[in-house]
Amino acid sequence: MSTAIEFRDLSFATPRGRLLLDHVEFAVEEGTTTAVLGRSGSGKTTLLRTVNRLIEPTGGEVLLHGKNVRQPDLIALRRGIGYAIQETGLFPHFTVERNVGLVLEAEGRSREERARRSRELLEAVGLDPGTFATRYPHQLSGGQRQRVGLARALAAEPSVLLMDEPFGALDPLTRSEMQDMLRGLLSRMKITVLLVTHDLDEALYLAHRIVLLREGNVVSERSPEEFMRSDQPEVTAYIRAFHRGENSTAHSADAEQSAS
Amino acid sequence: MSDFLSRYGAEILTLTYEHLWLTAAAMLFATTVSVPAGVWLSRSPLWANPVIGVANILQTIPSLAMFGFLLPLPWLGERAARIAILALTAYALLPIVRNTYVGIRGIDPSVVEVAHAVGLTGAQRLWKVELPLAAPFILAGLRTATVTCIGIATIAAAVGAGGLGELIFRGVASMDNRLVLAGAIPAALLALIADGALGLLERRFRIAGP
């Protein structure tokens, strides 16, 4: 297996000198999904954005299929990378179909090809093209918007997909539906995914590797099984904190039991 | 009344036409300068305050004074209309520059981020994303500028540039209120029509919110 994305001694400092990424070093194998975990401000999003050069690192380099991301033309680089974010960034004045075909439109592909591909992708993300293709983003629910955002990210058949908290703003039920859909979709495609999240369950469910960031440092890089078995203090602290959030209803459950 | 109209009707029509022409020419120049200037400022926001400041100062010059400054120019007689158009253009700059700038800067940051991330070129971003999404703002600026210009164009008669102001100035000088109204009412109607038409256009470009 070859390496799709490689971070080499990557650092990023803000103009005011705050170090957001501190000599980050790890690699993502082709066709696998790597989840980047960490609390807010740990540098997850910054790391993700160095891949499609929305952020230029101040030190080190990012390699995409063995080539520094600075080598290809910026526009070509970005068109070859899928990008899905929590806010979706759908164009409010474009229909769903046009939003999905955006990259193809930018590349000047024919109208028929764009329409065909848009409809294919809408089906792949679980939206009926007949119902949704002609709608506008404001006529969709949050989950539907995320599906459209994902379809857009996949439209140009990118080799790499970057996802930044794609399901972070969704209710738990919709979120798990989306995670099922994404898992099914990824298993059928040969695509490398870098998924930024703070949801441990999401990382365990979707990823082959889990990277834990803390204050711009990679503190752990393991498979999900190893991650859960690790006794490294930073890892156990994250797992414990995450599960405390989940078990916060324990008291009310106890109360109900004692009442009956 | 019909007496008055049969005497002045033709003149009112001619002066209305002149008035429209002065305003339209000024708006054409102002738009040609201001929309690109607003786009440029949205890319170089450091310049936004100084540039909008200058346009602001132009805007605050009382119109009678502005035309008064122009009076001593020796070649005024022949070219009064051109000078009036220049002055009107100066007044129209601010609302258009400011609204173009604000309209583009106000686009949802995640939309701008995605426009970059999917690899749109600079021109594609401008034509497919920024201008369409800023269009309601830009049109609102055009609307304000047009209504302002129609009003100020009545002062252009002070330098002999014609327009409906002629009737107003003549009416004031001869203390004939009918003449003042013959200038003022068509000018007001022009402003209302322009406001309504541009308002309709603006609404057409507005995108339904979430």
Image (tube, coloured by chain):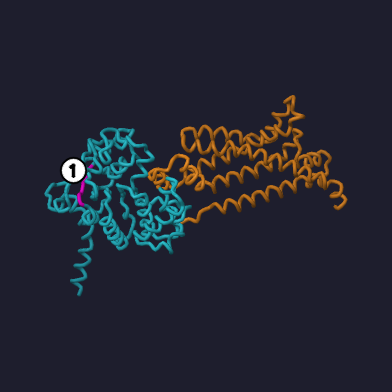
Relative to A12, is B94 on the left or the right? right
Task: Identify the residue at image location x=73%, y=42%.
Answer: B19
* Nearest the eye: B107 or B159: B107
- Mark 1 chain: A
Q: Is residue A158 magenta?
A: no
Asked where in the image residue A50 lies, by quadrant, the reply is top left
Q: Is residue A211 magenta?
A: yes
* Nearest the eye: A215 or A76: A76
Task: Identify the residue at image location x=20%, y=49%.
Answer: A210
Q: Which residues are magenta?
A: A208-214
Chain A, colour shown: cyan
Relative to B200, is B16 on the left or the right? right
Labels in figure, total:
1
Query: What secondary structure predominates along the stretch shown in magenta?
Result: strand
Chain B, colour shown: orange
Task: Identify the residue at image location x=28%, y=50%.
Answer: A191
Does A243 appear above or below A213? below
Does B199 appear above or below A74? below
Residue B59 location (% of width, % of height): 61, 36
Q: Which residue is mark 1?
A: A219
Q: Quadrant of the C terminus of chain B?
A: bottom left
Relative to A212, is B86 on the left or the right? right
Residue B116 location (% of width, % of height): 40, 43
Relative to A37, is A94 on the left or the right? right
Residue type of the residue flagged with mark 1: Val
Residue A211 location (% of width, % of height): 21, 46
- The residue carrying pointer 1 sits among few (fewer than 14), some (14 to 19) or many (20 or more) residues within 10 Å by Cα, namely some
* Nearest the eye: B95 or A70: A70
